[in-house]
Image (cartoon, rainbow, N blue to C red):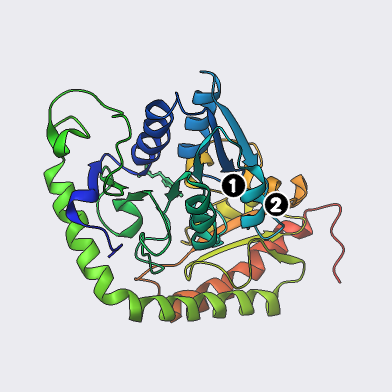
Amino acid sequence: MIHATPEEIVFSSGGTEADNHAIKGVAFALRDKGKHIITTKVEHPGVLNACMYLEERGFEVTYLPPDRYGIVDPDDVKGAIRKDTILISVMLANNETGTLLPIREIGAVAREAGVLFHSDMVQALGKAPIDVKEMNVDLGAFSGHKMYAPKGVGILYIREGLDPDNLIHGGHQEAGRRAGTENLAGIAAFGKACQLMHREMREDAPRIERLRKKLLDGIHTRIDDVQLNGHPEFRLPNTLNLSFGFVESESLLIGLDLAGIAVSSGSACSSGSPEPSHVLLAMGIAPEVCQGALRMSLGRGSTEDEIDYVLDVLPDVVGRLRSMSPFYKKK
Ligand code: PLP
């Protein structure tokens, strides 16, 4: 599914562990060569917090800003490379906006400079085609529960010939690269999910994309002052991130929840935090617009009727909340 050999696959407890293994593993294995790492401001906390941990231990990290669509320019990556750069880490698909980043080009920049390239590919697996060889990816993180396998299982792809330090020390499981008894049931389920998704992605993705477009078009026709966050074209088929002016996403979330519609006011990983999204802020979106951002994710089970239902309910919920806002004036 990702064009790797079985020997290049190390099972983990999830995407976070795989990100940590890649980043800390390369940093500690290559620290005599250099201590500089390049990443972006839109990464998942699994990457950002691993980098911050390394900063506290003498490594230097450059956090590249994205453009207003959440895309990082490969030329900016090239410009940030120094003699002591040992790792570049850039995600394939952003978990909050669905924006796809130009990984192939960034991988080529890394390869040309002789710097290792890690990509958090957690959100893209099963939704967009992945070829780690063609994308010049040296280390790639994946997670089962983003594609209908159970929670608690992930993968770190390690290109043949690379030898990052271990993250977890103990027994000799996973060819000595990740200690601890394997989560066999999770791994088997992840394998089955990969088989199914690999077969069905070609039909699923266009169907889901069509429903997402219907949802977005319908929202734009029915509700004014709505902004799409993320790139309009270079994006995953299933994710929408929208800011509704004069409405707080938390209130919108509750209103929709009462109507039986499950959405998110940010990424699941930061939903406990009242801070505006670091991803949207990095894209230059004003804090008050970030506060109104709502993430809607579609999946294999999403139906036309469900989209129609959301389009029926959403304008009323937004209208009710706006009628309570002292700042909102109907256009
Ligand atoms: N990276 C991205 C882009 C994600 O969306 C997630 C989601 O949780 C993770 C990493 C972490 O994966 P896990 O929950 O399996 O630790």
In which quadrant of the rendered view does residue 6 lie?
bottom left
Q: Is residue 21 above or below residue 313?
A: above
Q: Is residue 208 above or below residue 143?
A: below
- In this figure, which residue is indicated by the disc labeled 1? 42
Q: Which residue: 27% across, 65% down?
A: 1
Q: Amino acid at mark 2?
A: Met
**Residue 15 shown left or right of residue 7 in the figure:** right
**Residue 93 shown left or right of residue 60 in the figure:** left
In which quadrant of the rendered view does residue 127 lie?
bottom left
Report x, y in % for residue 222.
69, 77
**Residue 194 shown left or right of residue 42 in the figure:** left
Other residues around mark 1 within 10 Å, as few (<14) / some (14–19) / many (≥20): many
Label 1 secondary element: loop
Residue 277 appears in view: no
Report x, y in % for residue 56.
54, 19
The alpha-carbon separation of the residues under discs 1 and 2 comes to 8 Å
Q: Amino acid at mark 1?
A: Val
Report x, y in % for residue 167.
31, 28
Q: Which residue: 72% across, 54% down?
A: 247
Going from N to C along the chain, the mark reached first, 1 or 2, is 1
Label 2 secondary element: loop
Q: Quadrant of the C terminus?
A: bottom right
**Residue 324 shown left or right of residue 212 in the figure:** right
Q: Is residue 288 above or below residue 209?
A: above
* Count of residue discs: 2
Q: Mark 1 touching mark 2, by CB under 8 A? A: yes
- In this figure, which residue is indicated by the disc labeled 2? 283
**Is the CB of mark 1 within 8 Å of ligand 1?**
no
Q: Nearer the viewer, residue 184 or 331?
A: 184
